[in-house]
Image: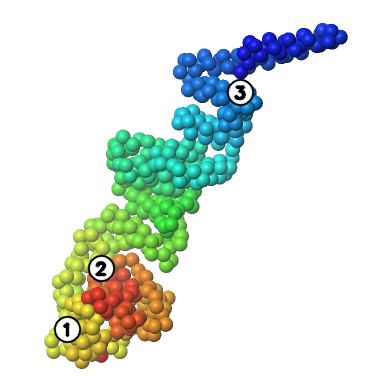
Amino acid sequence: MYDMSDIICFLGKIFSISSEVDMRKLLISLMFVMIFLVGSCSEKGKMTDLCEKGDKLACSWVDKNNLCKGGEGGNPEACTWLNNRKECEKGSKSHCFDFAVSLYNERMLDLSKEYFLKSLLQYSQEERESIFTAFIKENRVNFRVEDLMYFWDIGCDVGIGYYCSELFNILKERGLSSDYAKMINLAEKGCSANFCQSCLDLGNIYSDGKRGVPEDMKKALEFYKKGCDSCNELVLTGTKFHAKIFSCQMAGLLYFKGEKFGILKNKEQSIKYYKIGYGIDAEGDEDIERLRQKILDEMIGITCGNGVIDEGEICDGGSKECTEISSVYLPGVVQCRKDCKEWDVSSCSKNCPSSNSFCFLSGNLKWSGAFEKMSWGAATACCKDLGGRLPTISELRSLIQNCPKTETGGACGVTDYAVEHKEVCGGCVKASDGRYSKLGDTDVSLWSSSEIDKEWVYVIFSDYAWVGSGSRFNHDLSFRCVK
């Protein structure tokens, strides 16, 4: 910073001062000047020595020091770099953060992370989440995936669980077995930070028992419970799947049917977690309904075949008369499917005899059997040839059962006055056993006569009890006639 000519010039000025100056004061002043100069020289010498030994930070300091030129006419960015480092070493957390950013821009990544941690860990948890998230959001457009992974790793290390989960997902998508140990470590960090998606991920890891991790359902239960008890976050922004809900449901499942895994059945705990899992934002939410069905499928996988109809099962072995399934069937025998989810009605007949085309009764209407797919115009003509007509949408809705939203009188606003109710109504979770139809319809979409406009007509989707629409020109659908 100072060479010998600077020192000689400075000393010359001092000794040219009037002889009236008190020599003691002069010597004291000179002593402090020399201490300052020696200190400056010693820091520069120290950094130069470290640079010669390969210390990248020291080399950068030497370069910046030369560029700064003591602040007089030097490079402002270099001076800021030196000041940020100096103030950081004094304990300034904001200067440490700025210094870390500078080191990152110089691609000194290990040192940059060290100073990011040094800065962020001085803030409260709420402050560090706000500061770091704002920084990533502001710069994200300039980041590649590798950059994001670098910063997510830092965020995870300072206890921001969301970033542990983001990095976990990247490694999961990459699918390398070499990443699995790190994935577990990330999930553990995220769960420790009370981020429920990470707790759920850990529960799934130990329940799956894959990739060298032994199955441990007791451990899985521990993490599912933590995900349920301490978290509220969404799994992914923009979706309605809640990690908390899924964790609660899995905890309830294991308390209910975990005996085969060494978990004592605890009905009280099972009810507690099911109540939380199924009670959060579940009513009218199709995504949660699908999630509910997923949990029931998991449960059926454990209980199917024990001869007892447990929660989520329609049957568990055995057979019964087709007419017991629905009055629309002719006499015959039906068997329970192997997955316990429904009766196999493929052997049951529900075709009207040729002598009576309208053999089904529902309400005050006589209904034909279900016809094969054809266009809306052809279906209209067919019903007319039989001596009947296509049903209105209100008449079709009168056939819906076990799905309150689209049953007659339900929340769905679609009526015969279609022109005033241009909407579609989501129904219930998919079921192919005919449970939503009073006439046992499965895997069909049925035309109505209610027109929405010049192209679109209201229809019913049997397996979901949905009220939707079909194009009279471009779609071929099934139908029933009424009279």
Residue at mark 2:
432
Instruction: Give neighbour class at mark 3: few <14, some 14-19, many 20+ (Cα, 10 Å).
Output: some
Q: Tell me which amino acid carries mark 2.
A: Ser
The alpha-carbon separation of the residues under discs 2 and 3 comes to: 80 Å
SS class of the residue under badge 3?
A: helix
- Nearest the viewer among 297 and 62 is 62
Closer to the chain start, of discs 3 and 1, is 3
Question: Which of label 3 and label 1 is nearer to you?
Answer: 3
Mark 3 and mark 1: Cα distance apart in space? 99 Å
Where disc 1 sits, the SS reads loop
Tell whether label 1 touches label 3 (CB within 8 Å).
no
Q: Is residue 232 above or below residue 482?
A: above
Q: CA distance from mark 2 to mark 1?
A: 21 Å
Q: Which residue is mark 3?
A: 69
Q: Which residue is mark 1?
A: 352
Amino acid marked by disc 3: Lys
In the image, residue 9 sits, relative to residue 351, either above or below, namely: above
Q: Residue furthest left?
A: 354
Percent from the top left, x then y, of residue 258? 34, 49
In the image, residue 158 sits, relative to residue 328, either above or below, namely: above
For residue 55, say whether it is visible. yes
